[in-house]
Image: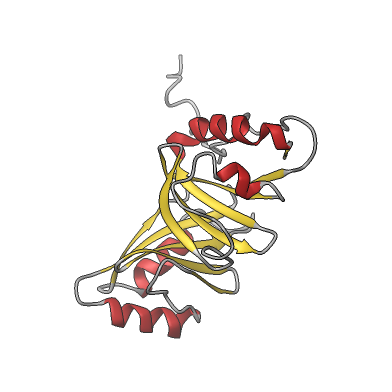
Amino acid sequence: MSDPLTASPLHLGKRSAFDGLLKPIGHGTGVTIQDRSDLELIVLAARKGQAGALAARMDAGYGLRLPSAPKRVVSGHLAAIGTGPGTWLLTRESEASDKPGAFAGELTQALAGLAAVTDQSSGYAALRIGGPRARDTFAKGLDIDLHPRVFGPGDAAVTACSHIGVTLWQLDDAPTYEIALFRSMAGSFWHWLSESAGEYGLAV
């Protein structure tokens, strides 16, 4: 009799942190959401005294100028979001043919001695949130002001939303935002979002 633990190899499929959670709430499209589980998320931290050399290497190798402030800079499918002194959250649009972790491995080799590279694609959850009432929804839980006078396209923040730590960045004037948070907090964040956006109509 075969051992059920060794009878066949174990295959683990990729699953969104929001799987089974996202659904339309209320009526209308005041707020729209899109699951961004296809977005690669990588934390980049400069090693001591290497921030300048790291910036030069990223610019030369990937055409990406690492921001020195809470901003989002884009080069093709790759973007860098300043999250603190010498630290960035890199986002990359992935394709179905991409091997998980391959790009993080490439960065680890390319930036050896200059930075610590941590693939957080399976550790974080991300959503795209937009619509004419997106700001009104965020005002119910976000710790920062998103008024267009002070926060616009290309701006980013590491903050809290309904007591949940998040990294938020604005994509355009629509306005459209993307938000990343720890995967374990996806259920709690969705509960807050669905309750807060329901009166405006939440469309998936």
Residue 153 point in image, percent of width and height: 59, 67
Res. 16 in view: yes
Up-down relation of residue 66 to residue 4 (above or below): below
Picture quadrant where residue 198 is located = top right
Q: In the drawing, does residue 10 fall left or right of residue 16?
A: left
Q: How is the image coloured?
A: secondary structure
Q: Nearer the viewer, residue 60 or 126?
A: 126
Residue in the picture at 44% in, 82% down: 59
Q: In the drawing, does residue 116 fall left or right of residue 82?
A: left
Q: Which of 189 and 7 is in front in this view?
A: 189
Up-down relation of residue 138 to residue 55 (above or below): above
Res. 19 in view: no
Up-down relation of residue 104 to residue 17 (above or below): below
Residue 201 point in image, percent of width and height: 74, 36
Q: In the drawing, does residue 172 fall left or right of residue 147?
A: right
- Which residue is outermost to the left? 48
Residue 29 point in image, percent of width and height: 77, 42
Residue in the picture at 60% in, 74% down: 76
Q: In the drawing, does residue 107 fall left or right of residue 127?
A: left
Residue in the picture at 65% in, 64% down: 172
Q: How many marks?
A: 0
Q: Nearer the viewer, residue 113 or 191?
A: 191
Residue in the picture at 63% in, 29% down: 20
- Which residue is outermost to the top? 1
Residue 204 point in image, percent of width and height: 72, 40
